[in-house]
Image (cartoon, helix red, strand yellow):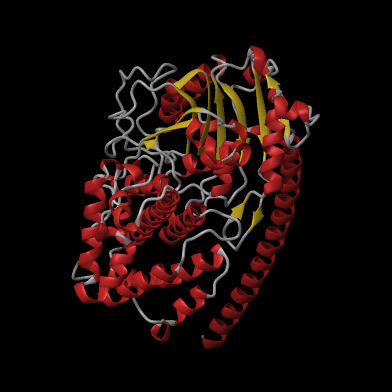
Amino acid sequence: MATAAKRPTDQAELFSASTAKEIQAILWKAADKLRGSIDAAQYKEFVLGLIFLKYVSDAFDERRSELATELADDGITEERMDDFLEDRDEYTGAHVFWVPEIARWSWIAANAKSQGVGKLLDEAMDAVMAENPSLKGVLPKIFNRDNIDQKRLAELVDLISDARFGASEGKPAQDVLGEVYEYFLGNFARAEGKRGGEFYTPRSVVQLIVEILEPYEGRVYDPACGSGGMFVQAAKFIEAHRGRGHKADLSVFGQELNERTWRLAKMNLAIHGIDGNLATRWGDTFAEDKHADLKADFVMANPPFNIKDWARDEGDARWKFGVPPKNNANYAWLQHMVSKLGERGTAGVVLANGSMSSESSGEGDIRQAMVEADLVACMVALPPQLFRTTQIAACLWFLAKDKSPQGARRLDDRREEILFIDARSMGEMVDRTERILTDADLAKIADTYHAWRGTASTREEGLTYGDEPGFCFSARLETVRERGYLLTPGRYVGAVEAEEEDSEVMTERIAALTEELFHLFKESDRQQDLVAKLLGGLEDANS
C-alpha cells in the first residue's frame, strides 16, 4: 500500500473526507481515470466489482472482530482463538460471506505491488465465488488483461483501501457502502445515456412506488429488475418504519434479461444485506419465466418502454385480457404482472404515457377488459425529465386484485373506482436536464392515495380524501366508460378545461401569426414588383 508521503492528491482529499458524499465524488473521480483503458460496456461492472469485493471483505473483518471479542469474553486464549476465527460457520451463520485469505482486501493491498494487482483481483473474485454458491458466476474477472492500465488500477486499490467504509454520520458501514454503490449506479446510468435506463430507475420514482404500495412484509417481485433498485428501496422502507431487523419480513424475487445487469443486481442486493432470489441466471421473462409459480403480494417494476422485439406467444395463458400486439410489449408486461398477483396483491408499474390511451393493435380492448375487471386502482401522470436516459413521457399504473374494505385492515371500499393523479407540474430541476420529485411531492402523492384507500396511517393522521381540481379525482367506472376507457389523468382531474383554454390561446396565436404572415407576403409581393420594374427598366436601357 502507498505510504502517506506518496499518496496521490485524490487520496489526500479522501483521507480528510468526512461525509459519504465526499467519498462518493472522490472515488468517482479516481475510477474515471480508468475509463479510457476499459471497454465501455464493462466499465461499470469493473468498478462496482471492486466496490463489492471491498464490501464483503469489510463485512468479514467486522464479523471477525466481533467474534474475537466474544471469544475473549468467553476466556478463549489467543493460542486457540485462531481456530475459532477461521471457522466458516461463525460467518455464514451470521449472514456474512465467507472470504478466503487471498480475497481479503488487506491481503490484496499488501501484495498488489509485488505480485500484480490485476492477477490478485481475478484470483480473489474466483475464490469468493468458489466459497459462496449464491455468487457463482456473478463477480467480474476482467482485471488481469492487457488493456487494463495496471498502474492506475493499483492506485484505485490504494484509494479504496483508504476510503474506510466504516460507520459515519450515524450510519452503519453497510449503509455507507450501499450509498456509494447506488451513487455509482446512478452516475453510470447518466454516463451511458439512453442505454443506462435499462438498469437504473431514478430514485424518486422508485420511492414513490414503494411509498404508495407500502411493502411491509410478504413477497415482492420485479420481472425486469435491472440493478435491483426496487428491492433496495423496499428494504429501506421497512427499515425506516419498522427497523433494520424486519428486512427479513420481505421475500425478494426478480428476473433480468441482461447478463451484466443481472450481476450488478446480485451484488447490489448482497451489499444491502438482502437475501433475494434472482434465479440462477439471467433470462427473458416472456420466453422463460424464472418464477412461473410465484404469487406475489407486491409487484414493482420499470420494464423497458414500447419494446417491439419481444418473445410473443399468442397462446400464452398470461394474456387473459387479450393478446398484446407484436410491435409493443406494454400490455404484455401489465398482464404478466397481473398473473403474478396474489389474492390481495398490488402492483406499481412505470410505463410510457401512450399506454394510458393507445387504441392501436387491440391495446384499447385490453385496457377496457382490465378496467372492467376492476384491476386498475390508480393512475399517476409523472412530470417530464425524471428519466434522464429517455425523453419519453412516463406514467405509473397501480393495480390491485382486491379493492374491497378487507376486514381488519378497515380500508375504504373502492370497488369500481379509479383514482387519477396529475403530477406533471411537480418536481424540481437538479440540473439543466434532470428533474426529481421532492420529499414534499412524494408525501403529497402518497398521502393522497392512502387517504383515498383509507389506510390506518391516514386515519391516525386525520387525513381524508377529497377531489382536488387539477391534481386528483376519484372516478366511478361509469365515468371511465363514458370517456372511452382512456386513463390519462388530465382528462379527469380538470386538465381538460385547461387544455381547452390552451386551445383558445393557441387559436388566437395562430390567427395573429397568419395575419403577420399575410402582411409579410404582401410586403414580399410589393418588393418583387419593385424588383421586376427595376429589371424591366434595365432591360429597356440596354436595348
* Res 19 → quadrant: bottom right
Return the residue nearer the eye: 370 or 22: 22
Instruction: Confirm whether residue 190 shows in the render.
Output: yes
In the image, is residue 317 above or below residue 440? Answer: above
Return the residue nearer the eye: 187 or 409: 409
Q: Is residue 206 left or right of residue 469?
A: left
Return the residue nearer the eye: 40 or 447: 447
Residue drawn at point x = 61 percent, y = 80 percent: 534
Q: Please count the marks in the image.
A: 0
For this orientation, the residue located farthest to the top is 407
Return the residue nearer the eye: 46 or 496: 46
User: At which x and y percent is residue 1?
Assistant: 34, 76
Residue drawn at point x = 31 percent, y = 70 percent: 109
User: At which x and y percent is residue 43?
Assistant: 33, 62
Instruction: Confirm whether residue 149 shows in the render.
Output: no
User: At which x and y percent is residue 18?
Assistant: 57, 69
Residue drawn at point x = 67 percent, y = 27 percent: 419
Q: Is residue 225 left or right of residue 109?
A: right
Residue drawn at point x = 57 percent, y = 29 percent: 398
In the image, is residue 430 above or below residue 200? Answer: below
User: At which x and y percent is residue 192?
Assistant: 41, 59
For this orientation, the residue located farthest to the right is 462
